[in-house]
Each structure stands twice: as C-alpha cells, then as structure tokens.
Image (cartoon, rainbow, N blue to C red):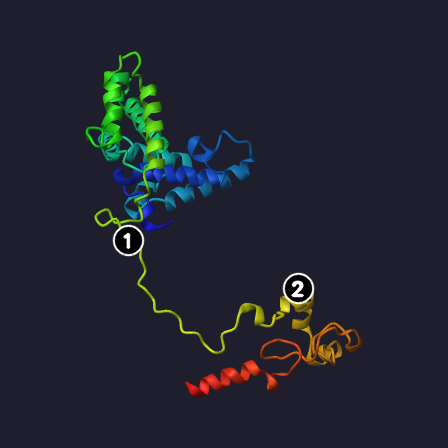
Amino acid sequence: MQEHEKLQGHRNFRTWKSMVELDLRALNLLPFITSRCGEDIFVSPSRRVTLDAQALQYVRASVGKSVQSRLNDVHTAFDAYEALCKMFDTNKIMQYVDLHNAFVRLRFRPHFDASRFISDFDQLITEYESMIGIKFPELYVSTMFLQKIDGIYDANSPYSTFYSTIVSLPDETATLEYIKERFSRLAQSTKKSTPNQTATNSSTNKPTNLTSKQPPKRPHSSDKPETDQPKVKTMKSKYTTEQIEQLKKMSSAEKAAIRCGKCSDYFHKEADCKNSGRRCYNCDVYGHEAKNCTQKKKEKGKTNTE
C-alpha cells in the first residue's frame, strides 16, 4: 500500500474507509471489522483467530506512522477499525465541506453525459438529505437542478428555450421527474446534432492534435511488395511445443540422429522430406544455404557502403 493512500487523519478518512472496506471484502475479511472476531461467519476457533489477525495486520498497515501509535493496545481488527472511526469519523464539519465542494463542482456542460449528470445530482441530494436529516422540497431540488445546467440563461443556448418552457408550465406539470426527462431528451438531441469539438481548437476550429508533416519516404531499391517476400517458417510453426522442449534437452549427437539429410530439419527422414532443399540459417528459407544467401549479401553490402 502506497504511503499517500494510508490514513493520515480527518483529511482522507472517508477515502481510506472506502478503500479498506473494499480490499477486505475482496480478501473475505470484511466480517472481522463489521463484527467482533468475525461473529457473522462460521469457521473453526483456530481459523477465526488466524483470519482476525490477518485483518488486524491489514488495518495496521493501512494507516500512517502518526496513527499507528494509537493502535498499540488494540488486539482485534474490529476494535482497531472502531477506534479509528471514533477518532476521525466524528468531524461533521469536514463532511459538510467535502459534500458542499462536490455539489459546487457539479455542472452540466455541452457534450456531457446527461444520464451521468442526473445520477450524480441525485446522489449528492440524497447525501445532503441524509446528513442533515430532512427532506428537501421538490421545488427547491428542481431549482438546484436547473441552476447546474450551463447556458440556462444564455439566449443563444438551446437550454434557454428549455428553461423558458419549464418556468411557463404550471407547478403540477413541471415536476422534478418531468424536468429531468425533458432535459435528458434535449441533451441527447443536442449532442447528436452538434459536431464533436473535443479534438479541435475552439478559437481556430482546427484540429489541435496535428502531427508535423513528414517528407515522403524515398523508395529503396530493396523494397519489395509483401507478396514477393518468402514465407519464413519459425520454430513454432514447424514443431510442436513438445518437440521444441525435446530439442532443448537433446545433445548434438541425438539431434543429428533425427535430422533430415536434405533440408536439415528435425523429426523426419530424407525419404519423407517435402522441402525444396537445404534450409538457410540466415533467412530460414529452404532452397539454399547460408553461404549463398542473397539477403546476407545485401546486408553485408549495405554495411560496407555505410
């Protein structure tokens, strides 16, 4: 676990808590922090002690050095987790600040996913209501929803017309669900009709990710179409995995006993050979030997000229 992910105090307690619960769930150790010694699961006493020790070890390793000293007298994962929650989960001001900042940052802008925006908005409203213990009036929530839409007061924006329509409707018609449905349909149609601007510069309307122009590649005399290139047979294409492993374990004399005298490949006799001739060890093509390989000569000549 990286140092910046470890619990340091009120500042990152909520993030740490979510991470620890998720990790312990994946390790099948979550019951040991939700109940004392994993009372919710059925295991043998010795196994219970082992699993609880593993959960406690994880919790200790997940906190910073300044916090670890507060867990010296704790002997179960449940007690350690409960102690940390009492230390750092009681600061309601920090929770209010985090929630308020998240709500302030939430905005719907062109090309955003409308369904994702609605889901995030509903989640934040639910957290607000749960934290303060009251239910917001629907009219107030509708007002907050409309204020989160960019361009709602801009006469040139399609959302301005949408806003004018909503405020002209009677209250029994302009419900929160109705507003969300009309907004979702408008956002979807607007996104389809507007070209994607993410890859362009807004001031010049030109692509921003243009690569520099490269000079045309000069043709080389040795360049040939792919169809003219001989097909190279690799070890994997000629032999099975078992045969390759067998060759690795064989001595030179053993290999010579199973080598073809015509093409120099293994695992067949000269009378059964279907290849055109000796296999070149330079280009792995049949019909010539390495000393007569034209590819080798070209490479050598190229090296000399360079």
Amino acid type, residue under disc 2 in the picture: Thr
- Quadrant position of the C terminus in the picture: bottom left
User: Nearer the observer, disc 1 or disc 2?
Assistant: 1
Q: In the rendering, at what x and y percent does residue 100 appear?
A: 23, 31
Q: In the rendering, at what x and y percent does residue 93 appear?
A: 22, 30
- Asked which quadrant contains residue 133, the reply is top left
Q: In this view, does 152 lie above or below 64?
A: above
For the point 65% across and 72% down, the residue is 248
Q: In the rendering, at what x and y percent does residue 126 appear?
A: 32, 24
Locate residue 196 relative to residue 151 in the image: left or right: right
- Asked which quadrant contains residue 7, the reply is top left
Badge 2: residue crowd in 10 Å (few <14, some 14–19, many ≥20): few
Q: Distance between the residues labelled 1 and 2?
A: 49 Å
Q: Farthest residue toward the right?
A: 271
Q: Which comes before the other along the chain, label 1 or label 2?
A: 1
- 264 and 114: which one is in front? 114
Locate residue 239 relative to residue 64 in the image: left or right: right
Q: Which mark is residue 241?
A: 2
Report the label total: 2
**Which residue is disc 1 drawn over?**
208
Q: Is residue 9 above or below residue 188?
A: below
For the point 28% across and 53% down, the residue is 208
Amino acid type, residue under disc 1 in the picture: Thr
For the point 32% across and 60% down, the residue is 211
Locate residue 157 relative to residue 185 in the image: left or right: left
Locate residue 124 relative to residue 224 in the image: left or right: left
